Image (cartoon, rainbow, N blue to C red):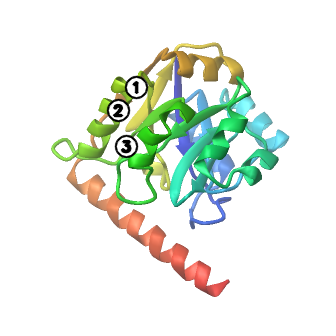
Amino acid sequence: MLKADLHIHTSEDPHDPIAYSARELIDYAKTLGFEVISITLHNKLLISKSLSGYAKKNGILLIPGVELNIEGADVLAYNIKPEDARKIKKISDLKEIKKRKNILIAAPHPYYVYRSLGKKLVQNIKLFDAIEYCHFYLKWMNAPNKKAARTAHLHSKPLIGNSDMHHLWRMNTTYTLIDSKKDINSVINAIKKGNIKVVSTHLGFWKYARALCGTFGSIFKRKVLKQRK
């Protein structure tokens, strides 16, 4: 089983100020035993032979990914090309890239408050291959994830565990174990078939509060940076 986190942000992100680089992330992921990761910047694909090579040297498969904001909601797309990302303006546009078998489309944090699909997920459920179980919850306060799990079960979609990481300490509380060979196509196919298992532990009050402050801080910094531009 491959230990994977497929929703991670780094300092190369054009929208969020983040303290660690992609290479620093890879170094850290190695110490935690991760074998598959995806760096999913906001509306930007981070594709580099040198970065993929660096990940491989550290025993990690790096899957190209991006977190697209479409119609005001976030969507995760894996193994697409920069030109694909530029063409996607509406959720319905996902239908075209899904014609390729080696593409994976996932719904991140679909029932949380900020930049989430909400009702649009079920309305467009055929366009999604997987639904995310997010790390951001408490043992007694986890309604968004429970709803995501119900939707996944009702529509026979696999549930993937991710960190949506903006700070290194958030990694390793929620992740996915994938029963697959260690190559991109095999991993994507395994996820689509549901040959996966979500491993998740709630944050606890203080880590949850720290994550909440970090999230609001990122939103504020994003607005400041946007105003300066």
Question: Badge 2, how many Cα within 10 Å: few under 14, some, many 20+?
Answer: some
Tell me if residue 218 comes above or below residue 139 in the rendering: below
Do we see residue 118 in this rendering? yes
Q: Position of residue 190 (x, y in %)?
A: 57, 16
- Occupied quadrant, residue 184: top right
- Occupied quadrant, residue 2: top right
| Residue farthest toward the right in the current orientation of the protein | 49
* Distance between mark 2 and mark 3 Cα atoms: 17 Å
Question: Badge 1, how many Cα within 10 Å: few under 14, some, many 20+?
Answer: few
Tell me if residue 221 comes above or below residue 178 in the rendering: below
The amino acid marked with disc number 2 is: Thr
Report if the CB atoms under discs 1 and 2 are less than 8 Å apart: yes
Report if the CB atoms under discs 3 and 1 are less than 8 Å apart: no
Q: Nearer the viewer, mark 3 or mark 1?
A: 1
SS at circle 3: loop
The amino acid marked with disc number 1 is: His
The numbered disc on residue 155 is: 1
At a point 46% along the width and 76% down the height, the residue shown is 220
Residue hosting label 3: 135
Tell me if residue 93 comes above or below residue 212 in the rendering: above
The numbered disc on residue 151 is: 2
Q: Split into 4 quadrants, where in the image is the C terminus? A: bottom right
* Distance between mark 3 and mark 1 Cα atoms: 22 Å
Report if the CB atoms under discs 2 and 3 are less than 8 Å apart: no
Q: Position of residue 225 (x, y in %)?
A: 59, 79
Q: Which of the two labelled residues, at mark 2 and mark 3, occupies the earlier sequence position?
A: 3
Tell me if residue 194 comes above or below residue 37 in the rendering: above
Is residue 87 left or right of 218 when viewed as pictured? right
At a point 54% along the width and 22% down the height, the residue shown is 191
Question: Badge 3, how many Cα within 10 Å: few under 14, some, many 20+?
Answer: many
* Distance between mark 1 and mark 2 Cα atoms: 6 Å
Is residue 89 left or right of 34 when viewed as pictured? right
